[in-house]
Amino acid sequence: MKPDPFVLPSATSARFVLLMLTTTIGSIMVFSWIAGLFGGTFRGPVAAARVECVNDARRQVLGLDGAALTDGFTGCVNGAYRSAFGLVAAMVGVLLLVAVLAYATAPRFISREPLRALAEMPDSPAVRTAHEVLAASGQPVRVEVAILRVTAGARAFGRLGRYRIMLDAGLLAHGGRDPRVLRGVLSHELAHVRNRDIDITYLTLALWWGFLAVVVVPAVVYSAVEPAMLTQVSWRLALFLVVLWLTRTAVLRSREYYADVRAAQTAGDTGDVAAALQPRHGRPRRWTLGANHPTEAQRLAALDDHAVLFRLHPGEALGAGVLLGFAYPLMGFLLGTVWPDARLYVHDWILGLLLGTCAAAVVAGSAWRAVQRALADADARPPATWPAAAALTGGLLLGQLLTPNLPEAGSWAQVLWSEPLVAAGVAAVLLVLCQVYLRWVVRSAYSHLRGNPRPRGQAIFGVLAAAAVFGWWVSAWLKLPAMLVSSYPTWQTVTIGLGAMISNPVLAAGVIWACVYPVAGLIRARRAEIGRALLTTGAIAIGFTLAMLPFQGRLGGLLRAGQVWPALGLCGVVAGSVVVACAFGLGLWRGGHRRTGEAAVHAALAALTAVPALVAVVAAYLITATCTTNVLDCAARGAGFAVQGLTGVTMAGAVLAVVLAALAAMAGSAVRAPLRPSTPPPPTGPRWPAVAGLLPTVLAVAVIGGAGATTYLRGTDNSTAMSPDSVNLLRQYAASIRPASLPRAVACGYGLAAHSYGVGLTDLSGTTWPSRLGVAATAAASADDIVLQKLGDEAMRALLAADLTRNHQANRAIADYCGIVTAAEAAKVPADHWPSSHNR
Amino acid sequence: MTEAPPTINEAAAAILGELAPEELALLDPVAAGFFGSDSGRDRAVRTALEGRSGDDPVGFDLAGGAGLLAAFLLTVLNGVACDLLTAGVSGQARGWWERRRLRKRLSGAVAPQGSDTPLPQLSSTDAAEIGRLALQLALDSKVEPERAQRVANLITAALTGPAR
């Protein structure tokens, strides 16, 4: 049975929105360069303002203390950045204004030729046919005839609900000989109007033309003044234009298929549209990738079989990935400039929601449609996700390669140039995440579409929720390269970065949602087996308690030797083994052919529910292993440690347990499939027992969510007291300060490592953050530059007072000072702009 | 007594009557637009000689090119009336650049009395050469070969004066 292409929303709206968003953000790359926010030879007005900040600091340094100098210099540089940002915002505003004007004037531009209303045309069979088609459609569209167009074409245009269709006089003439052709073409254009293609298409085109006029032309002109732009920006801009063009034409071609199918659906058969698409005399188009329309043969094939409207195509995923990978660091850089003091991850959540959501809506929307087709056609195979996952990964990485190096917004490309093997590892992580994500989207779609008589609302909600989940986790992945280049990309820093990802509470919320959402679909379809999932939860909890018994002595030994992390690792390995065993058993028991996804969903739910119980058992074992005398008092203290120390472990455990359980259940199901075919599950009766059965999961989610939020808030609280070891370490660094003993370039290298890029400083790899901050402050305070000395002193004072906000501000001032001085000296800014000997 | 040579409009109507009677109703509005404005003529000449309306987004371009013979006939006959399409120019319509220049000349010229301008009566040799040029232009604008040949023959006939 053929599925109806218009039951679920098409994914093309998200593609259009992503295109428009990326076009706008792409302009920021050029505008920021012109405004002097990054790159360039440091001659722009904003760059000069920042040079003046350095000059002011050097003039005033002897009369100010470190705190006042830091405040004054930071305020001055921030002001310069803000004015640069204002300039960029104004230029983006001009781009948008030009685009809006182009959109508003497009109808006038298109209709600037002799037109005559259809009603005023001399009566003829063709005119009567056109009137019949219009009357049958019932759409209030103005139809005009371009009386001097010899060709047999037509086009829809207009704006904001006032749409027009222009028919070539050649089409009317052709319609006189073959009315089916005229009917087909006119129905196709009416379908464009009904599919709401006009506004979004012309807005996208207007933005494209605006981009060429307001961004590309100035960039080319500016390249003549600043040849460095050619190597830093122009080639990226050229590649970006190619990607934009190909993505735009691809989405326009998709809309053509939809219009053809809509036209055929309205007419009741495909005859008229097929007649209009029949190959005629003339050379066929050879290269179709850059064309706005598919070939006639492709369109005829799509009319016959709608598969093209229900596919998860790697090309779409590639385009979405490139645009996301390119736009993300640029927006991150701007957001960091405007809002430098946001909490950890807050920028990423905003960007993930904004950009990642659009990209994912493209992919998730297509995945839901692919599932719709698979459900409608019993013979159709479940949609394959590997090609799209690989394309999405490749696109994201390619987009990162296109992004210029930006301060404080590291990209995968920087990791690639420094450590190709580490970059490959990070890319592999992304590939796995993309594949897991797409499998989850497909699973969710199956859960919610099967047997659903009104799937449209569910699909819209499902796609939006899936898009938000993707946006948040992809932002967590994009944070990983930024973290890596802030110290040095090694396998150890990759591990730390991945660990930090787990402490991201929004990501944890995404994992929880990933478990619960497909189950909700199964409950709706009465296919949920919550009881069996809870049974597995119990088996995991009891199994882990028993499995730890033989290891109790070893655990005590490790704890008494002060090896807390190996002890926790031992618990983790045992817990992971039990989870895998139980989930495998569940897959073997309830899985089988076409039931693998359901088994994986139930196993993930079971593991998620078991996590608090596992943590409680771990805490109990840790307490009993360490408390041999005075047990009650010791247990009370131990419980406090467990609550504080195990919150991060809870987060990590929840994520790992869910992933392991799903994979193990899939393995169990795969083993069962060839042995014994599964039977569909019987209806599980009323829904309320299944919903009530979710209560333990809800409690588990509350515990995990609470633990995650606590960990995040504590981890990002800048006034947290430091451990005595850290304080001792910092005192040692403070004592080692020797003013004027370190060349400025070296001090800057370490200063930047604490705040921004430290790639190349391998001696910092693997060090803890207090150590890195201490090194940065010590190096700056020991520099042979008096401004740096005072800024370094201020950074060290703030560290010793455990005031990380103040330390961050001083470090930022050090990074800005070093960046400006280095760039100005490299650019050989004239002496009157750069009185470097003035205050030495 | 010699018969008056046909005007552009009369010749076009005669040819359409033979080849595309359904277009007769369109001839007057098309002629009014063609001779009424420079931009309209430019549009007509361009689409007549290219045979495609382009790759408009949210548009539909019927594969196979020119559907309206009237504008093509007006383009050719106006060119003849303005002495732009004369014997010896056929070589100038080969190649992209030559066709572009010819298109510019054809859209820039207008017969003195518009559609009522009488067509010159040529020798059969010269008329045949213009017919070959018309055939080439029609094929370039993707008119079906058989139809293009008939158009060329009828244009040749319309331009051929009485034997002297």
Image (spheres, coloured by chain):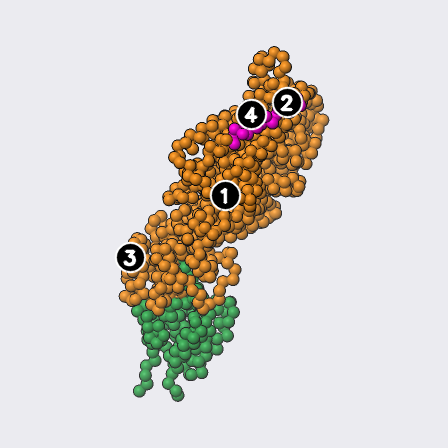
Looking at the rendered structure, which numbered label has been put on residue A615? 4
Q: CA distance from mark 2 to mark 3?
A: 83 Å
| Residue type highlighted by circle 2 | Gln
> Disc 2 marks which residue?
A552
Q: Secondary structure at mark 3?
A: helix
Q: Is label 4 in contact with label 1 (beta carbons under 8 Å)?
A: no
Foreground of the two, A680 or A808: A680
Query: Mark 1 vs mark 3: same chain?
Result: yes
Which range is magenta?
A: A536-554
| Residue type highlighted by circle 3 | Ala
> Disc 1 marks which residue?
A678
Identify the mark nearer the N-term, 2 or 3: 3
Q: Is label 4 in contact with label 3 (beta carbons under 8 Å)?
A: no
In the picture as drawn, the residue positioned furthest to the right comes out as A741
Residue A692 visible? The answer is yes
Identify the mark nearer the N-term, 2 or 1: 2
Identify by letter the chain in green: B
Foreground of the two, A571 or A71: A571
Is A542 part of what is drawn in magenta? yes
